[in-house]
Image (cartoon, rainbow, N blue to C red):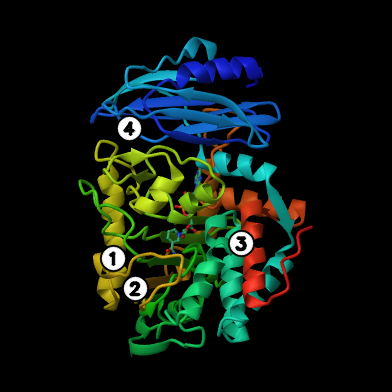
Amino acid sequence: MRVSPVALQNLLSRAFVIDTTTRAASSGVAQTASVCMVRTAQNVRLSHAHAAVGRRQLSAAFTAEPLSSDRGNALLEDDDGKNVANHRTDRKQRLLANEGSFPGTTRTTSNLGSSLFVYIPHREMSSSAAAAKQGLVALEEARRFMVECLVKSKTPLGHAKQQADLLLEADYRGHFSHGMNRLEMYINDLHKNACSGEAEPTILNETPATAWVDGNNGLGAVVGNFCMDLAIKKAKEVGVGWVCAKRSNHYGIAGWYTLRAMKAGCIGMSMTNTSPLASPTRSKEAALGTNPISVGAPGKDGDEFVLDMATTAVAVGKIEMQRRKNEPIPVGWAQGPDGHPTTDASVAFDTACLMPLGGTELTSGYKGYGLGAMVEVFCGVLAGANYATKIRKWTHAGADSEADLGQCFVAINPACFAPGFEGRLSDLTGILRNMPMTDPNHPVLVAGDPERIHMAKVDKEGGLAYHVNQIKTCTELSKRLDVKPIEVK
Ligand SMILES: NC(=O)c1ccc[n+]([C@@H]2O[C@H](COP(=O)([O-])OP(=O)(O)OC[C@H]3O[C@@H](n4cnc5c(N)ncnc54)[C@H](O)[C@@H]3O)[C@@H](O)[C@H]2O)c1
């Protein structure tokens, strides 16, 4: 949908007169315009707006403020950071969104009260911003840079390559939060000796189908690859391999390990606990990590199912990326210090309290909370590692102590079950992908499809489109470590 800049500003000026403090950013080419407002049961009003006009996109978001708050400032900027609208508000003002002038919106009522709502996929938010401010880096160049930085950080070449391949795969699959974005954190940990670049994992206890591994505080990829390879070997021998590791470190995208199992013809499953960043339902403090789960299964002719997800509404890296880009986060991703949802990426980052998958109790957030706790059972508790609040606080600056994360790696040999697994898997994905669409422009996907779409895009463009701020961080890293700067195409 296209609207004129004047109409857009009119719309925004009407829609945004609420008790809010906001920061806004704009960039990119976008086709859509939307605005949403939710009034919660706690009498806190949250709103998010995202709008686009041809090549100019304006977007804004508001932090949640109790209706008694006096504060309010809505600021919109264009591509060059020029202020194009600035609305001061006070607590007497009320939302005046006019759905008639804004096609695409729908009015719904729910337990949360009346809401004018348009769903904005968060991937769309990320990609529209990335389109405007990015530097294209060839995959091999990104890998070279990561390997050299790690080697300059007390890590042997073989381990540096393993870690870099993991990070590169995250970027390639479109999870920029877990690729190059994480390099600096690993390097800080290595320089502070919070993690050992040299350490090799060892097996503590083993049966034909199981193994308990000590990661010896090594790099996450080194420990994870070791454990999944062991699980695959066991699955080939006895049908299933279930390996748990203690004393591991941040292991990146959980999908990396399931893909490893899938390449060997197995169904793969992996989970890790992480530093406390998510509140249990009904708490305003974080007790569980983002605790991702991945399950992957091979289909026919390269088809696959790869579920790889945080058990929080999003991975913390996604909030970090929004903050890096000075962009807001949608309602339901994270809580502010008062325990209520926030849309300010910086507030969310500083508060470090994500919401479980599902959001609030009203929207079944307790199911995400349950899944996060389940990951702890299979990881921290089963492996004898740290768990929940016993895990050190998450820090980008380099930790002062060992993380002692628990991780779980499972490989299942489908050949031990009904013959023709791959064919049926592809039949299932085919049924799902061919279901009638609610929007003809958005076909039904199965888990792993968004990543495949992203990989095809990277291949077509000939490189990874890093945000300009990511390139800046790389430049700083290259100076700090005396490594050749990353080459942008
Ligand atoms: N190591 C850690 O500490 C840690 C912690 C949290 C998350 N992570 C990683 O961060 C990455 C991002 O996690 P996330 O939860 O933000 O992922 P996400 O929300 O982008 O995707 C989650 C899953 O949903 C699928 N999906 C997305 N859109 C879909 C659609 N329209 N239809 C069908 N399926 C769809 C994806 O393919 C993926 O499998 C993951 O790789 C995860 O492992 C790592």
**Circles 1 and 4: CB atoms closer than 8 Å:** no
Tell me how far mark 3 sits from mark 4, CA to CA.
33 Å
Q: Where's residue 400, x and y in %?
A: 38, 76
Describe residue 394's horizontal placement relative to residue 376 as left or right: right
Q: Residue at x 26, y 44 (%)?
A: 339
Q: Amino acid at mark 2?
A: Gly
Above or below residue 252? Residue 243 is below
Q: Earlier in the sequence, mark 3 or mark 4?
A: 4
Which mark's residue is nearer the viewer, 1 or 3?
3
Looking at the image, can residue 3 be seen?
Answer: no
**Circles 1 and 2: CB atoms closer than 8 Å:** yes
Q: Residue at x 29, y 59 (%)?
A: 288
**Circles 2 and 4: CB atoms closer than 8 Å:** no
Q: Amino acid at mark 1?
A: Glu
- 90 and 293: which one is in front? 90
Q: Which mark is residue 273?
A: none
SS at badge 1: helix
Q: Which residue is mark 2?
A: 406
Q: Which residue is mark 1?
A: 376
Q: Earlier in the sequence, mark 3 or mark 2?
A: 2
